[in-house]
Image (spheres, helix red, strand yellow):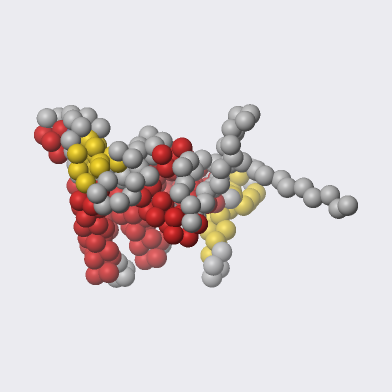
Amino acid sequence: MPEFKIRIRTTRPVSKGEPLTIFYWMGHIGEHTQLRQETIRMKGFFRCECARCKDPTELGTYRSGIVCQNCRRNNVSGYFLPEDPLDIEPDAKWKCSSCRAIKLAGNISRQVEKFQERISKMHEEFGSDPEDDRFIEFCKSFITKTSGISLHPNHWVIQSAITAAGEYLMLHRQTTLSLDLSMYFIKYWKHLLSIQDVLTPGMTRAIYIIKEDAYLTLMVVPLRIGFQGFYWTTSGNKSIKILRWNLRQYSEVSLEDFVDLTVAAVK
Ligand SMILES: [Zn+2]
Ligand SMILES: [Zn+2]
């Protein structure tokens, strides 16, 4: 009889007896419970009831949290969250975490869709012009005007604005990105990584994608501020190598290490 073995690697420490889970749906970097539930039900034909899906706060990240304006007027922090995150129907109830006010999921979705539409519209209009600053300016002001004001700072729509801005910079500003703008976005890459560290810890695909998006933006920094060791990139058509001048020789630095080093250097 042949002997079959399976080797499983976890992306974080697990305790004895703890069930092992996989990230069933890898499709989307800004995914959130409602979208994940819809997709898994449609494509996987089951209802995921993992700890993250069942938790209205998505493991404390408030990934879908909407600011309660009533609470905000009274200087109280309150966020609308689904009462039962597994109920994804439009008449499902979302409750304010502080004043207990209720909104319907359908209304919440419409509000969020409007934000999304604004990002897409601006992206379509100005997102392909390398000379035009309007898309980047829009993303910056979108983040400032919504973060903590209408959306939780960790909200996935804010994440999509950051990602869209990063993609624009990567496509059009590789050689002309200013240090200021780079520093500005590093703050947000760090923020995204901190959320993802909770949701998909370890060297998971989502974290890799964020780092991949981030690193071209980040490349500018070590070149300008010159912290210990230099980093070079030799860009072929697709692959970019990052080299570090250290101990009188160049060594290649992995993408992950590069992002970690750069992020750590910017305080
Ligand atoms: Zn789940
Ligand atoms: Zn409230």
Residue 97 horizontal/vertical position (percent): 25, 32
Q: Image point 52% across, 51% down: which residue?
A: 24
Number of numbered tags placed on the structure image: 0
In front of the other: 168 or 46: 46
Q: Is residue 154 visible?
A: no
Up the image or down, 198 lies above or below 1; here it is above
Residue 42 horizontal/vertical position (percent): 44, 59
Q: Image point 14% across, 39% down: which residue?
A: 69
In front of the other: 126 or 34: 34
Up the image or down, 56 lies above or below 141; here it is above
Residue farthest along the left direction in this orientation: 73
Left or right: 23 in relation to 267:
right
Residue 5 horizontal/vertical position (percent): 77, 47
Q: Is residue 125 visible?
A: yes
Q: Image point 61% across, 44% down: which residue?
A: 246
Q: Image point 49% across, 43% down: which residue?
A: 200
In front of the other: 69 or 216: 69
Up the image or down, 264 lies above or below 48; here it is above
Residue 167 horizontal/vertical position (percent): 38, 60
Up the image or down, 177 lies above or below 247; here it is below
In front of the other: 47 or 151: 47
Q: Quadrant of the C terminus?
A: top left
Left or right: 60 in relation to 112:
right
Residue farthest along the right direction in this orientation: 1
